Amino acid sequence: MKYEAINSPVELVPFADLYVSPLNPRTVFSPEGIEALAENIRQLGLIQNLAGLRDEAGTVGIVAGGRRLRALELLQDDPRFAVIPVKLAPDQATAEVWASSENHHREQPHAADEIREYGNMAARGVPVPSIAVAFGVNEKHVYRRLKLASLPAPVLDALKAGTITLSNAAAFTISEDEAHSLAVLEQVKGHGYSDHQIKQMLKPDAVRGTDRRVLYVGQDAYEAEGGRMTGDLFSDQQYFDDVALLDALFSRKLAASVEAAKAEGWTWAEAIGDSYIGYYELENRKLDRIYKEEGVLTEEQAARYEELAELANGDALDEDGQAELAALQATLDGSYSDEQKAVSGVILYVNAKGELQKAEGLVRREDRPAAIEAGFLRPSAHAGAAEDAPKSALSQKLRDDLARIAQGARQHAILRDPDLLIDLLAYQLSHALRWEKPLGLSTEDVPNWPSTEASGYQLDARLTDNLARDMVGKDHAKSFRAFRKKGAEHVKGELARFLAAHYRGGSKDMAAMLDKETQPNIREVWTPTAANFFSRVGGGYLDDLWRDLLDLAPDHPTATTFARMKKGEKAEQLEALFRGDGDLRSALAVTEEQAATIAAWLPEGMK
């Protein structure tokens, strides 16, 4: 059948005579999207006519343009829209074809094309609010697209070609060095690099705003010294580019804190660069510790303390009450007296949150006699025996040196048996020997298991099964001999298993080299699910992710339908999408390119 679509007449029809035809397939729409479209029409006019079929009563059912008709309904206070141009179909068969054709052939612009169009409009002087109205999107969306519009053309070409994702392209916005950006682009195109990896490659030396040095120094102080920064519009992250300056400011502020501590009366004060100070640090320096002289509350203060504490436990304490409780707690905790400070000192450090911390009341060896005499420390349990014994002709420093020489002789001898050393390492790693370990190596837990347990996550069993065996109270020598008898392959397997479990990457350049060698793929072991990811982020994040993965405009029916779902339903839909649910992907018409994006997608910040 031939339809004379081009020659069909356009008539001016009173708005009151128009209605949405049952033939119109667009039944799902967003009220917010209709409002945005109405504002677009108010400012720019009705760019595209409606199409409809006149019925027996003389009114016109709109078969194409249902959203425009609903938007026009909001504009009936404007006389310009009292009469609407409508293209009329000659018969119902033609109207049905128009209805289905417009819906199925509606094609959303590629993200790269949209970005370039926004950039062209901005270059012509069109303000952001007007661009938002013209495209029926919010201003935040426009600002993000305009940030992408400033990218080098090859980056947008790669986005259009599908060799990088939209979020990959966004990662390039943190770089101001075009030559370096293009070099990184050539390296990552088509290789499934995560956004975080790309940012690391673009800014290998930059420091994030969450770094403890930044938090301690402060952005204002950094900028006041001329420090350069780069903003990441897409993750609300700041990058501090002048690392040498940041380190200098960090050291300067920490040094000032040391001087302030000395001014408080401590006999000595020093700072360390670590983010914490542990027992080993104090033990290694042979530092003793004295504690604050505890304060005493009056009966009235004690009663008030209990009253305030009870209110605080019930979250019923106001700001003034919290301050009063803190003051009483400080009195109860006590303080160091001037006499205590005269025989002890303090070590300062900045923790991971950028907060200055102090390990106070530390007594050095040379101050220990004075601390004992003042009654702040007890003499060693072995002091009496040592005092009764004849004084050694060897100084303590000389005895320490001789002990080191004896240890060196043992190391010299065992170096002749490399296999024994390898066996010892494997044995120590696979057995919990605690303080009786034969090698002076310490390991720390390198967490690899999320709090959501096994949801969407599966590692090689060697990383999760057969943990280090507890050896408390057992014969280590006998156990080690039995371990060696199992052969070199067993030793090698145990060594590889426990070294892998303690692998953390090292420096940035080392980690990058090792990643290149091993080609880790997070999605090989982890798939985002409702439990492990989607239910743990906000609904707006899920809406944006749904649209980005499926290349949907905000007012697309698939996007607006998803946006109206409850958060739990959204999480379930995304889990099904990532799981590869065939019915869902078929219903959404997921393309091969979109499927590849879904298969490679990772949240921001995953390494």
Image (cartoon, helix red, strand yellow):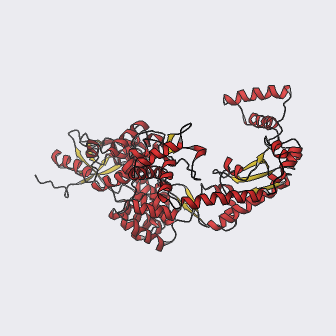
- The percent position of residue 65, horizontal first and vertical second, equals 30, 48
Quick one: which residue is furthest to the left in this view? 1
Q: Quadrant of residue 210?
A: bottom right
Q: Is residue 71 above or below residue 233?
A: above
Q: Quadrant of residue 296?
A: top right
Q: Left or right? Give the position of 425 relative to 546.
A: right
**Viewer-proximal residue among 207 and 546:** 207
Q: Quadrant of residue 394?
A: bottom right
Quick one: which residue is furthest to the bottom in this view? 179
Q: Left or right? Give the position of 236 relative to 185.
A: right
Q: Is residue 75 above or below residue 470?
A: below
Q: Left or right? Give the position of 106 relative to 1.
A: right
Q: Is residue 155 visible?
A: no
Q: Residue at x 73, y 29 (%)?
A: 309
Q: Is residue 479 visible?
A: yes
- The percent position of residue 118, horizontal first and vertical second, equals 43, 63
- The percent position of residue 59, horizontal first and vertical second, equals 26, 42
Q: How many marks?
A: 0
Q: Residue at x 15, y 46 (%)?
A: 93
**Viewer-proximal residue among 136 and 90:** 136
**Viewer-proximal residue among 67 and 549:** 549
- The percent position of residue 25, horizontal first and vertical second, equals 26, 43
**Viewer-proximal residue among 20 and 414:** 414
Q: Left or right? Give the position of 256 relative to 418.
A: right
